[in-house]
Image: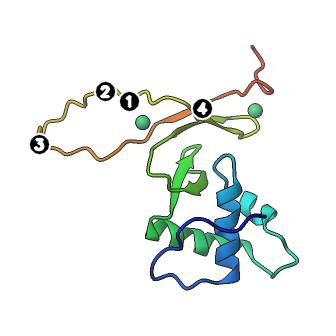
Amino acid sequence: MKEIQTVWPVGVKKTKPRACVLSVLEHAESPLSAMDIYSRIEKDTSTVWLSTIYRILELFVEKGVVVKTTVMNNEMAIYELNHYQHKHYAVCVSCRKIVAMNNCPMEKFVPKLADNGFHVLGHKVEMYGYCKECDPNP
Ligand SMILES: [Zn+2]
Ligand SMILES: [Zn+2]
C-alpha cells in the first residue's frame, strides 16, 4: 500500500486503526461499507473490530474528511473520501453492487419552494434496480 496523501484531519489523534481506515478509503475505487473496509484492513498489523471502524468512520464524517451516503432505505451506509464534488449511486437490489452515476439528474432542476428565499445546499438521489449480472429481464 502507498503512503497516505490525504491531509490528516485537524484535531484528530493519529492512530494505527484510523490511518488504516483512511488508507483503505483512499485506495477504494468505489464507496465502501464499514464491512468492506473491515475486510480490507490488513489484520496482521493490529486487531481492529468492526465497531471500532464504525466509530472511526463517524469521527471522519464529523471532521468532513469522509462522506457517508445511505442507500437501500437507510439499510446500508457507504463511505468515501470527501472529494468536495457530489456523486450519485445506483444500487443493485439483488447483489447490492454500487454503481456510480456519471451525471446528476438534478443538475438543471429548480426546486419550487414555498419559501423562495430558501438556500439549497445539496440533495440526495437514490437509484435502485438490477446490475447487468442480476438483471432477470435484460
Ligand atoms: Zn447485481
Ligand atoms: Zn446531484
- Of callouts 4 and 3, which one flags the residue occurring earlier in the amino acid sequence? 3
Mark 2–mark 3 distance (CA, rounded to whole Å):
16 Å
Q: Is 119 rendered above or below residue 133?
A: below
Q: How far, Cα to Cα, is label 3 from label 1?
A: 19 Å
Instruction: Measure the alpha-carbon separation of dots 1 and 2.
Output: 5 Å
State the image coordinates of residue 55 (x, y, percent, origin top left). Answer: 59, 75
**What's under tag 2, amino acid-wise?**
Phe
Asked if 77 appears above or below 98 in the picture, the reply is below
Element on which disc 2 rests: loop
What's the residue at 69%, 78% (across, down)? 17
Q: Where residue 18 sits: x, y (%)?
A: 64, 76
Q: Which residue is mark 1?
A: 106
Report if the beta carbon of the residue with label 4 is closer than 8 angstroms to ligand 1. no
Marks 4/2: CA–CA distance: 20 Å
Q: CA distance from mark 4 to mark 3?
A: 32 Å
Q: Say what amino acid the circle numbered 3 marks.
A: Gly
The reply to whether residue 52 is visible in this rendering is no
Which circle's residue, 4 or 2, is located before the other in the chain?
2
Mark sitting on residue 109:
2
Q: Nearer the viewer, mark 4 or mark 2?
A: 2
* Residue holding disc 3: 117
Q: Is mark 1 within 8 Å of ligand 2?
A: yes
Q: What's the residue at 60%, 83% (across, down)?
A: 14
In the rendered image, residue 94, in percent from the top left (x then y), is placed at 74, 35
Name the residue type under label 4: Tyr
Q: Which mark is residue 128?
A: 4
Please report the residue visible at 72 percent of the width from the left and 28 percent of the height from the top. Answer: 131
Can the viewer see residue 117?
yes
Mark 3 or 1, nearer chain start: 1
Mark 1 vs 4, N-terminal side: 1
Asked if labels 1 and 3 touch by Cβ distance under 8 angstroms, the answer is no
Q: Residues within 10 Å of mark 1 (few under 14, many from 20)?
A: few
